[in-house]
Protein backbone atom coordinates (compact mmCIF):
# COMPACT_ATOMS: atom_id res chain seq x y z
CA UNK A 1 0.00 0.00 0.00
CA UNK A 2 2.93 2.34 -0.62
CA UNK A 3 1.71 3.39 -4.05
CA UNK A 4 0.57 6.97 -4.52
CA UNK A 5 -1.15 9.08 -7.18
CA UNK A 6 0.99 8.40 -10.23
CA UNK A 7 1.55 4.70 -9.60
CA UNK A 8 -2.13 4.01 -8.86
CA UNK A 9 -3.27 5.99 -11.91
CA UNK A 10 -0.70 4.03 -13.95
CA UNK A 11 -2.24 0.76 -12.74
CA UNK A 12 -5.68 2.03 -13.77
CA UNK A 13 -4.40 3.07 -17.21
CA UNK A 14 -2.04 0.19 -18.02
CA UNK A 15 -3.49 -2.82 -16.20
CA UNK A 16 -7.20 -1.97 -16.22
CA UNK A 17 -7.29 -0.17 -19.59
CA UNK A 18 -9.32 2.69 -18.08
CA UNK A 19 -8.89 6.46 -18.03
CA UNK A 20 -8.89 7.78 -14.47
CA UNK A 21 -9.99 11.20 -15.80
CA UNK A 22 -13.37 9.81 -16.90
CA UNK A 23 -14.84 10.02 -13.39
CA UNK A 24 -14.56 6.42 -12.25
CA UNK A 25 -13.67 5.45 -8.70
CA UNK A 26 -10.93 2.86 -8.26
CA UNK A 27 -10.57 0.92 -5.01
CA UNK A 28 -7.34 -0.77 -3.94
CA UNK A 29 -7.27 -3.10 -0.91
CA UNK A 30 -4.27 -4.81 0.66
CA UNK A 31 -4.02 -8.61 0.96
CA UNK A 32 -5.00 -8.66 4.63
CA UNK A 33 -8.07 -6.53 3.81
CA UNK A 34 -7.26 -4.01 6.52
CA UNK A 35 -6.25 -1.01 4.36
CA UNK A 36 -8.16 0.59 1.50
CA UNK A 37 -7.24 3.38 -0.90
CA UNK A 38 -9.81 5.01 -3.18
CA UNK A 39 -8.58 6.93 -6.21
CA UNK A 40 -10.69 9.28 -8.30
CA UNK A 41 -10.46 12.50 -10.27
CA UNK A 42 -12.10 15.68 -9.01
CA UNK A 43 -12.23 19.01 -10.82
CA UNK A 44 -8.85 20.11 -9.44
CA UNK A 45 -6.95 16.81 -9.73
CA UNK A 46 -6.53 13.30 -8.38
CA UNK A 47 -7.77 12.48 -4.88
CA UNK A 48 -6.81 9.51 -2.69
CA UNK A 49 -8.92 8.50 0.28
CA UNK A 50 -7.15 6.22 2.77
CA UNK A 51 -8.79 4.00 5.37
CA UNK A 52 -6.99 1.72 7.83
CA UNK A 53 -8.91 -0.58 10.15
CA UNK A 54 -7.62 -1.04 13.68
CA UNK A 55 -9.43 -4.37 13.93
CA UNK A 56 -11.49 -6.57 11.64
CA UNK A 57 -11.44 -6.76 7.86
CA UNK A 58 -13.02 -4.87 5.02
CA UNK A 59 -16.06 -6.57 3.52
CA UNK A 60 -15.48 -7.06 -0.19
CA UNK A 61 -18.48 -6.90 -2.54
CA UNK A 62 -18.94 -9.49 -5.25
CA UNK A 63 -18.35 -8.31 -8.81
CA UNK A 64 -18.38 -9.61 -12.37
CA UNK A 65 -15.22 -11.72 -12.83
CA UNK A 66 -15.26 -11.14 -16.61
CA UNK A 67 -15.18 -7.34 -16.52
CA UNK A 68 -13.64 -6.77 -13.06
CA UNK A 69 -16.18 -3.98 -12.57
CA UNK A 70 -18.76 -3.17 -9.96
CA UNK A 71 -21.21 -0.31 -10.26
CA UNK A 72 -22.30 1.12 -6.92
CA UNK A 73 -23.39 4.48 -5.53
CA UNK A 74 -21.37 6.71 -3.19
CA UNK A 75 -23.55 5.74 -0.23
CA UNK A 76 -22.60 2.08 -0.67
Image (tube, rainbow, N blue to C red):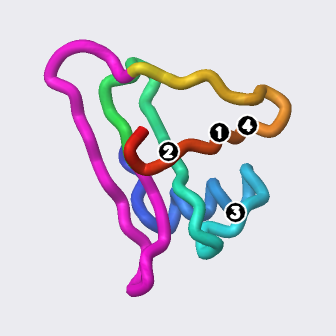
- Residue 21 figure quarter: bottom right
Q: Secondary structure at mark 1?
A: loop
Residue 44, percent across and down? 39, 86
Asked if residue 14 is positioned above or below residue 20 in the image, the reply reads: above
User: Which residue has dot 4 on it?
Assistant: 68
Label the magenta part by its dominant secondary structure.
strand
Q: Which mark, residue 70?
A: 1
Asked if residue 48 is positioned above or below residue 60 in the image, the reply reads: below
Q: Secondary structure at mark 4?
A: loop
- Earlier sequence position, callout 2 versus callout 4: 2
User: Which residue has dot 3 on it?
Assistant: 13
What's the residue at 52%, 60% (across, down)?
7
- Report, in whole angstroms, how far the alpha carbon at label 4 lies from the one at label 3: 14 Å
User: Which residue has dot 2 on it?
Assistant: 27
- Report, in whole angstroms, how far the alpha carbon at label 2 lies from the one at label 1: 10 Å
Q: Which residues are magenta?
A: 38-58
Q: Residues within 10 Å of mark 3 (few under 14, many from 20)?
A: some
Q: Give the left or right position of residue 41, taking residue 19 as reference.
A: left
The residue lying toward the viewer, choosing from 30 and 47, is: 47
The C terminus, quarter of image: top left
Amino acid sequence: MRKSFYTLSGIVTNDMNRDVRQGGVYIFINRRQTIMKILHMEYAGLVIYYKKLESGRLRLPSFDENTNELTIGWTD
